[in-house]
Amino acid sequence: MRTKFFLFILLMIFSDSAPALIEKFLEIAPDYQAKLDFTGEKLKYQAQWMGIKSAQAELIVKSINGNYLIQGFAHTTGWARVLWKMDDWLEVETTRSFQPKTYQFHYREPFIEQDLVLSFDLKNNSACSERIWRHKPKRSRKEFQLYQGLDPVSLGFLVRSLDWKSGDKRYFEFTDGNERYRILLEAEKIKTIK
């Protein structure tokens, strides 16, 4: 009980300075060395709702001009498609060290038909997102200050490519075009699940 109370007081004292400390930490450029080559990788996902197949997705990794081109497609299937027609896709081009060049996400759902385009300026540590609605003359722009400059897809592949040991902790920063996120990942022992 005494330890929990002490930690609570410590968090109260440093809670306002914690975001500033994380910001300073993120300003230091990470030296991540990708250990894997994902060229040719193809991932297929199937989703079920109450035991009924309802959606499927596919992610394909190609090599283009020495970079990765990652394409993803997702759509509803079967009876779920009658209730909710979804045909979304994305396309991401990143360097071999997963620094994003382009990120495009195309939403095609009953109430959302829009395109999200993220552009990254790694020299100036910034990103800009633009949303374009297909059936409305509406556009919105948002700018972000980013130090690591990652999108969700590049981050996923970067995390998979790193050499992790049990107990390793790493901070990452990314944007999905709506917000900027800072996350801490910690590696644990591999567990076999039967």
Image (cartoon, rainbow, N blue to C red):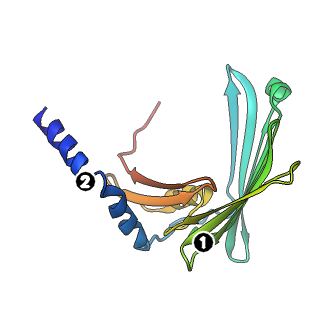
Q: Residues within 10 Å of mark 1 (few under 14, many from 20)?
A: some
The residue that mark 2 highlights is 14
**Residue sitting farthest toward the left:** 2
Q: What element carries label 2?
A: helix
Q: Viewed as shown, does residue 181 lie left or right of 25?
A: right
Disc 2 marks which amino acid?
Phe
Q: Which residue lies furthest to the right in this view?
A: 135
**Which of 27/82 is in front?**
27
Q: In this view, does 41 lie to the left or right of 152?
A: right
Which of these two is toward me, 178 or 44? 178
Q: Local crowd at mark 2 within 10 Å, few (<14), some, or many (≥20)?
A: few
Q: Name the residue under label 1.
A: 96
Q: Nearer the viewer, mark 1 or mark 2?
A: 2
Give the position of the N terminus as an image quadrant: top left
Q: Which residue is drawn at 57% across and 54% down?
A: 179
**Can residue 75 be seen by looking at this rendering?**
yes
Where is residue 38? Give x, y as percent. Answer: 62, 62
**Mark 1 or mark 2, earlier in chain:** 2
- What residue lies at 49% left-to-right and 69% top-to-bottom? 147
Front-most of residues 72 and 152: 152
User: Which residue occupies the extreme bottom position in the image?
Assistant: 123
Location of residue 80 (image quadrant): top right
Q: What element carries label 1?
A: loop
> Which disc, if any, is residue 88?
none
Q: Is residue 91 left or right of residue 26?
A: right
Q: Which amino acid does label 1 sit on?
A: Arg
In the displayed structure, 126 sits above or below 138; it is below
**Label tally:** 2
CA gap, disc 1 and disc 2? 38 Å
